Image: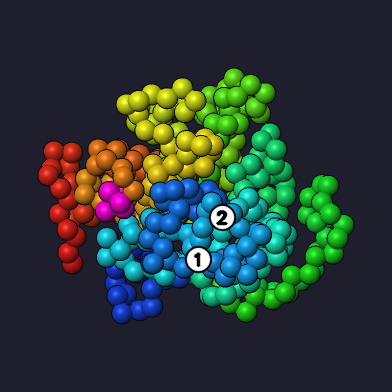
Amino acid sequence: MPRTLAAIGGLLLAAFVGAASAQPPKVLFVGNSFTYTRPPALQYNVANVVDLNEANAIAMPLGSDPALPQPWGGVPGIFKALADQAGLEFDVRHSLRGGATLRGHLLNSNPAGWDLRANLALEKWDIVVLQGNSTEAVDRAGGQFAQFDAYVGKLKRFLTVGDAHSYRERDLYAGGSNTLRNLPANPNANPLARLYLYQTWTRPDLTYPAGAPYAGEPIETMAEDLRAAYAQAAINHGGFAGVVPVGEAFVRAVQDGFAQRNPYEPEPRLFDLWWHEDQFHPSAYGAYLSALTFFGAITGIDPASFGADEQAAGDLGIRALHAMQLQRVASAQLRASGYELRTLACLHASPKARGAQPCTR
């Protein structure tokens, strides 16, 4: 896999840089609140990404949360800002629903009647990111790996093959429903689409409180369970461009001494990757680290190229020092996970530099 990821990164970067006159690649983020995040990232850069569920929220407000108004920007919005600064054009859209599982996106099984499957079939996507529910992939956390794995495969088929077919979940995994599921054809299926799995992160609220599934264990334990689950699903179904190691990047930020290990016992000199109100959604720091990791995985450009004056970090209120720490964490984790990265010196600012130099081509 490492050599495959390296080749993909290099070829993808060459294609983006060398095809300025072509239509920008169409990117779809599929997921839930871990992708749309919380303030201040929640509505970041909404003018430059498309929230495919804004119309659903308007038509069926009972299915939305008035405390989290749409449109959303989140990780896709930050990713778009990073790409624009690097001179790369992407058409970035997202289909996100609070608490949604991968199964829910394909079967439209979330409440309020939001047609999430229609978003999947809306365009011939070049790049698709699939983010499962935060506990969906891990049995110990209350999820069901067998179901998660089955729907990784079903979504891959819908997005890349697109044939109409019927099935019963009992035939896919033990304990599955006997209901006959009828999936329509996807007229925009793209066999060349690059699919990525979004490896999510340890939840402190499932780790530190007494009685939690991972109580008494370090954050590395749940992180390893998530890593293994996403890696196994990618292996089981093959053909994925990669698993984007966001959860491992969270752990690396802690282990490198930049981020708090236990947000319930704050360390004032370290930043908190998790949102202060619930300790499982991403804070601005967590959302920024997620987007940096996606930027490097998808483009093949080293996120540490941005340096001190990166715009999105400043917009989100992240200090230059912390921005560079997060950039280095994303870079190191991507390399450790087998991604080959190209440094763009024109984006780089060293810790001693007054500011990053603008990237010109």
Q: How far apart are marks 2 and 1 (CA)?
A: 16 Å
Residue under label 1: 51
Q: Is residue 282 visible?
A: yes
The image position of residue 169, as x and y in percent, is 80, 56
Residue 229 within the magenta-colored segment of the rendering: no
Disc 2 vs disc 1: which is toward the camera?
2
The residue that appears at 27% across and 60% down in the rendered structure is 85
Q: Which amino acid does label 1 sit on?
A: Asp
Quarter location, residue 215: top right
What span is colored magenta in the figure?
A: 311-315
Residue under label 2: 66
Q: Is residue 221 left or right of residue 257?
A: right
Q: In terms of secondary structure, where does tag 1 sit?
A: strand
Q: What residue type is labelled 2?
A: Pro
Q: In terms of secondary structure, where does tag 2 sit?
A: loop
The residue that appears at 57% across and 24% down in the rendered structure is 208
Q: Which residue is at the front of the view, 302 or 356?
A: 356
Q: Can residue 28 be seen in this view?
A: no
Q: In this view, does 86 lie to the left or right of 118?
A: left
Residue 313 within the magenta-colored segment of the rendering: yes
